[in-house]
Image: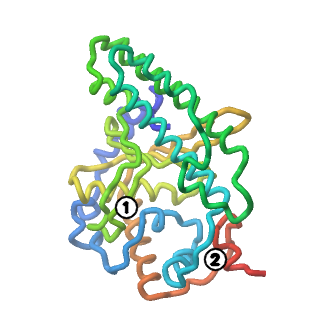
Amino acid sequence: MYFLSEEEKRWVLRHLAPQARARGVAEDLRGWNWHRPPLSPIYDTTLGVSEVAGQYCPTGRDLYLRHVLRVNVPPSRQMVQGAYLHALLERIILSAKRALYACEDDPVKALSVLDYPDLSPTDDASALREPQDGALDESLPDKGSILWSFQARRIVTRVQEVLAHQPHIGIDSLVNLALPVIVEQRINGSFLGLKPHLSADAFVWSEQMVVDIKFGRKEPFHRLSATGYALAIESIYEYPVNIGCVVYVSLEDGQVLIERDIHHIDDELRQWFIESRDERARLVEEEIDPGLPHVCPETCPYYQVCHPE
């Protein structure tokens, strides 16, 4: 999920990255300028990146219900599935890195531990809560197995490719060249008025790219997640993060389908994220009920709360 194809790499290196450098980013929209407007927080309320960027409820009434009225609801079936598959992707990367660091002489053989995973949904704490629309999806282990096998093959292939060019490479260098990704990258978002324990799906350091993985349909606001994490990274480490990638993953007929939206984290996205942060923080801090949107997605976990009939 995290590794670009050769064509995508060329497109990023030859087109997107030079374009991003040429267009640039307004200095006051770089995360390291968190101490002055427009990035400096207006309200004391802190939100997670997903609460700012996940605009599935167009008016933000889900935030009002959660933070002001303290309404707790079980996750939807889609949320449980997404949490389980996200945890699985994190687990396979960590398992591969552990196996490589523990191996003594044959890295490819060491990766045989990836062949037979235990894919019980109950391994993931976030999947323990029963979804509001029924029991856990019985097909989850099968979907997980398909996803795991796909990713395991990609990992083995990447390790073999590195070894083919660098047969005497050390293990630490091998891991960093073959798997240049930090999964569940932890970031302190406090400087930007965000939660102090943010967690980005992944950061690929070889492309300096924030990655966000989605298992549902495409939405125009999905780019805001990578934008929020990029701003937070800039605020802490003070180096530019110009590229984001939303990876759309679907499982159809036993096959993994992937579509990547690789994009420049430009001024427009940064301004959109900051305006959404301020608008939603104000909604919570001033306890404003924004009302129902014209159309409520039935997959929203608060749907029955807003439509009790």
Q: Which of 192 and 147 is in front in this view?
A: 147
Q: In this view, does 251 lie above or below 77?
A: above
Amino acid type, residue under disc 1 in the picture? Arg
Q: Name the residue under label 2.
A: 293
Q: Which of 41 and 304 is in front in this view?
A: 304
Of pointers 2 and 1, the one earlier in the residue sequence: 1
Q: Quadrant of the C terminus?
A: bottom right
Is 10 situated left or right of 309 in this image?
Answer: left
Work out how far the residue at label 2 is from the one at label 1, CA to CA, in angstroms: 24 Å
Report x, y in % for residue 263.
43, 47
Q: Mark 1 points at which residue?
A: 270
Q: Please tell me how crowded label 2 is: few (under 14), some (14-19), or many (20+) other residues with Cα within 10 Å.
A: few
Report x, y in % for residue 118.
58, 36
- Where disc 2 sits, the SS reads loop
Q: Tell me where residue 197 sits by quadrant.
A: bottom left
Q: Nearer the viewer, residue 284 or 5?
A: 284
Q: Please tell me how crowded label 1 is: few (under 14), some (14-19), or many (20+) other residues with Cα within 10 Å.
A: many
Report x, y in % for residue 270.
37, 61
Q: How many numbered discs, if any?
A: 2
Report x, y in % for residue 146.
63, 33
Q: Tell me where residue 26 sits by quadrant.
A: bottom left
Identified at 68% across, 73% down, the residue is 303
Q: Nearer the viewer, mark 2 or mark 1?
A: 2
**Contact between labelled residues 1 and 2, with CB atoms less than 8 Å apart:** no
Identified at 58% across, 71% down, the residue is 58
Amino acid type, residue under disc 2 in the picture? Pro
